[in-house]
């Protein structure tokens, strides 16, 4: 059996997404900037995709900019948010994805901002009193806090954080890569200035993404060149990526509750079976709390073991099970996780992130727990 439990790293594409993209690899190959009919038909399709994304998120098309993925969208929001709004102080958490952390560290190194890191506890909860203290001392900051953590699954309260940011006139960017396509984002009612998406996290194509920027918080471009994306991102558009990400988001919204129910059943069965069958099992962050973590992510901490120490992902792989030890976006996924370090996870235990999609089955959970039992010498 081969089991793919690494959906927080990337997901399989939906056949309907591929079908929507194919005509734009074959017959509709015009450059969307060309004024002739070959170009115009592609331009129309891009704008239809933008309108679809905007409708689903309760935003306006003028607020959506297509990018090469979540990383570029994060970079754009942060770097250009800082530059456009004359921001001198930034606040983030040590649990952010490197797309945010490394970008802000670079901004601090270049002297663009002073950077403050929020306090987090050993569950990965962010200290909102600390956020308020930092904002009080540094109004007009940039606040960048992710919606949900890609490693431990913790979901942050964007409304509470956004309201604080508003109170102190801060620019609030949230990395929503792990929640886009899995949760509803109602941007008329969510107090955020910029959020992002990567299409490959919800059954769309890799190398596709978008950035939402609230219309009264406009920013300058990150990539200069032609007039594409209304002068916000030069370069001929990744047409198939744009068609694909919009289709993937449309499919995600069509039956979000159904998908969620399916994946939640998988995750809760996994938790129950692990608790019942693997003595000493623990869970990192809030990932075992169904209402406080992504339904797609379960971060398991396994007891110290001579056979598996440092080899657990390899041993699972030998049984055909693909999972991850940290953020899979950094290639060589077994390098230590900055997130687990920041929440003080015990170094002698092995941590493994299982992450799910609607294409997974409960049989795959049962198979994986059986293999874990074998690996940990649990006698049936
Ligand atoms: C939370 C988070 N932010 C950003 C990214 C980067 O997204 P992309 O791969 O689309 O550049 C990832 C990818 O794992 C992620 O999990």
Image (cartoon, grey):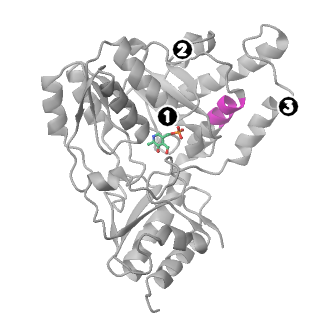
Nearest to the eye among marks 3 and 1: give it: 1
Judging depth in this view, the residue of 114 and 249 nearest the camera is: 114
Position of 333 relative to 221 (above/below): below
Q: Main secondary structure of the magenta part?
A: helix
Judging depth in this view, the residue of 59 and 142 nearest the camera is: 142
* SS class, disc 1: helix
Position of 373 relative to 287 (above/below): below
Give the mark nearest the N terminus, 2 or 1: 1
* Label 2 Cα neighbours within 10 Å, binned few <14 / some 14-19 / many ≥20: some
Residue occupying the point 51% across, 50% down: 257
- Which residue in the structure is indicated by mark 2? 232
Q: Is residue 246 magenta?
A: yes
Residue 372: x %, y % from top left: 48, 78
- Left or right, residue 64 beside residue 87: right
In the current view of this chain or complex, which residue is farthest to the bottom?
A: 379
Ligand 1 closer than 8 Å to the CB at disc 3?
no
Residue occupying the point 32% across, 78% down: 280
Judging depth in this view, the residue of 188 and 82 nearest the camera is: 82
Q: Which residues are magenta?
A: 240-247
The Cα atoms of the two marked residues, 3 and 2, are separated by 28 Å
* Label 3 Cα neighbours within 10 Å, binned few <14 / some 14-19 / many ≥20: few
- Which residue in the structure is indicated by mark 3? 26
In the current view of this chain or complex, which residue is farthest to the top?
A: 35
Residue 131: x %, y % from top left: 19, 34
Ligand 1 closer than 8 Å to the CB at disc 1?
yes
* SS class, disc 2: loop
The Cα atoms of the two marked residues, 3 and 1, are separated by 28 Å
In the current view of this chain or complex, which residue is farthest to the right?
A: 27
């Amino acid at each position: 059996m081969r089991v793919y439990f690494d959906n927080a790293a990337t997901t399989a594409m939906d056949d309907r997404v591929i079908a929507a993209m194919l005509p734009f690899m074959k017959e509709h190959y015009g450059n969307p900037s060309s004024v002739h009919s070959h170009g115009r038909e592609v331009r129309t399709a891009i704008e239809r995709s933008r309108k679809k994304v905007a409708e689903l998120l309760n935003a306006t098309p003028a607020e959506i900019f297509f990018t090469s993925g979540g990383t570029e969208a994060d970079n754009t929001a942060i770097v250009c948010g800082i530059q456009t709004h004359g921001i001198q102080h930034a606040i983030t958490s040590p649990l952010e994805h490197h797309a945010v952390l490394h970008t802000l560290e670079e901004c601090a190194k270049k002297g663009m901002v002073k950077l403050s890191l929020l306090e987090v506890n050993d569950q990965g909860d962010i200290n909102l009193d600390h956020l308020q203290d930092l904002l009080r001392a540094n109004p007009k900051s940039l606040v960048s806090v992710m919606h949900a953590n890609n490693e431990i699954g913790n979901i942050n309260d964007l409304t509470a954080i956004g309201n604080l940011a508003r109170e102190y006139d801060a620019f609030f960017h949230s990395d929503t890569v792990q929640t886009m396509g899995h949760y509803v984002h109602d941007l008329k009612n969510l107090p955020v200035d910029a959020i992002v998406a990567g299409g490959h996290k919800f059954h769309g194509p890799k190398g596709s993404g978008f950035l939402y920027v609230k219309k009264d918080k406009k920013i300058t471009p990150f990539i200069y060149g032609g007039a594409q994306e209304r002068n916000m991102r030069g370069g001929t558009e990744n047409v198939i990526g744009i068609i694909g990400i919009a289709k993937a988001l449309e499919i995600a919204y069509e039956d979000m509750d159904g998908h969620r129910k399916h994946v939640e059943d998988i995750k809760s069965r996994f938790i129950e079976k692990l608790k019942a069958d693997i003595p000493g099992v623990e869970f990192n962050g809030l990932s075992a709390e169904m209402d406080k973590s992504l339904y797609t992510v379960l971060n398991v901490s396994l007891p110290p073991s001579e056979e598996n120490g440092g080899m657990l992902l390899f041993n699972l792989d030998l049984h055909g099970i693909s999972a991850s030890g940290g953020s899979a976006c950094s290639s060589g996924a077994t390098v230590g996780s900055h997130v687990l370090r920041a929440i003080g996870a015990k170094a002698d235990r092995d941590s493994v992130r299982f992450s799910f999609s609607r294409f997974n089955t409960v049989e795959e959970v049962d198979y994986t727990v059986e293999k874990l039992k074998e690996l940990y010498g649990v006698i049936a």
